[in-house]
Image (spheres, rainbow, N blue to C red):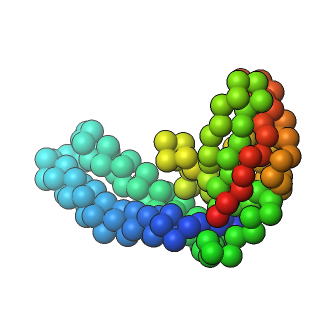
Amino acid sequence: MSKKISYYTKEGLDRLTNELAILKTKGRADIAKQIAEARDKGDLSENAEYDAAKDAQGHLEAKIAQMQDVLSGARLLDETKIDTSSVSILSKVTIKNNKNGASVTYMLVSEEEADLKAGKISTQSPIGRGLLGKKKGDMAIIKTPAGEMEFEIVSIGA
């Protein structure tokens, strides 16, 4: 796999690291227990529980490998050094929808940290991509699944 560099807040990087540690310890222990219990039930050639546990083990190991790959390309961003002259990753940007006048504030983050309910959108999302590099007062015309939308950049903060 190619190394994809992703930038994270301290909170986001800690969350990913903790999740990986849990998968490697508790996750692997739980799967091993399931396999042992299924093995104790007799003939493995006709044991659906054993097959399911082995499949679950494969999925867990794939997820662990994927998370290790993500973390190998993870970089911690110093939130105090964010340039607020234009929209970039970790910027908190307030935008106004020119069609209905509604304003909303988003923080632009990596894909893995995105959480719309918390106001964090990915730099890879249509809105995130459309806002990157814009300055206060700029207009951003963004193609979304709902159609083309026009936003004004009201403010940019860290």
- The picture places residue 53, in percent across and down from the top left corner, at 30, 49
Q: Is residue 28 visible?
A: no
Q: Residue at x 56, y 55 (%)?
A: 112
- The picture places residue 54, in percent across and down from the top left corner, at 34, 51
Relative depth, front residue between 14 and 83: 83
Q: Residue at x 71, y 42 (%)?
A: 95
- The picture places residue 106, in percent across and down from the top left corner, at 62, 48
Relative depth, front residue between 106 and 41: 106
Considering the image in quadrants, where does the C terminus appear?
Answer: bottom right
- The picture places residue 141, in percent across and down from the top left corner, at 84, 36
Judged left or right of residue 123, residue 115 is left
Relative depth, front residue between 24 and 138: 138
Q: Residue at x 13, y 47 (%)?
A: 41
Q: Residue at x 86, y 46 (%)?
A: 138
Judged left or right of residue 68, residue 128 is right
Considering the image in quadrants, where does the N terminus appear?
Answer: bottom right
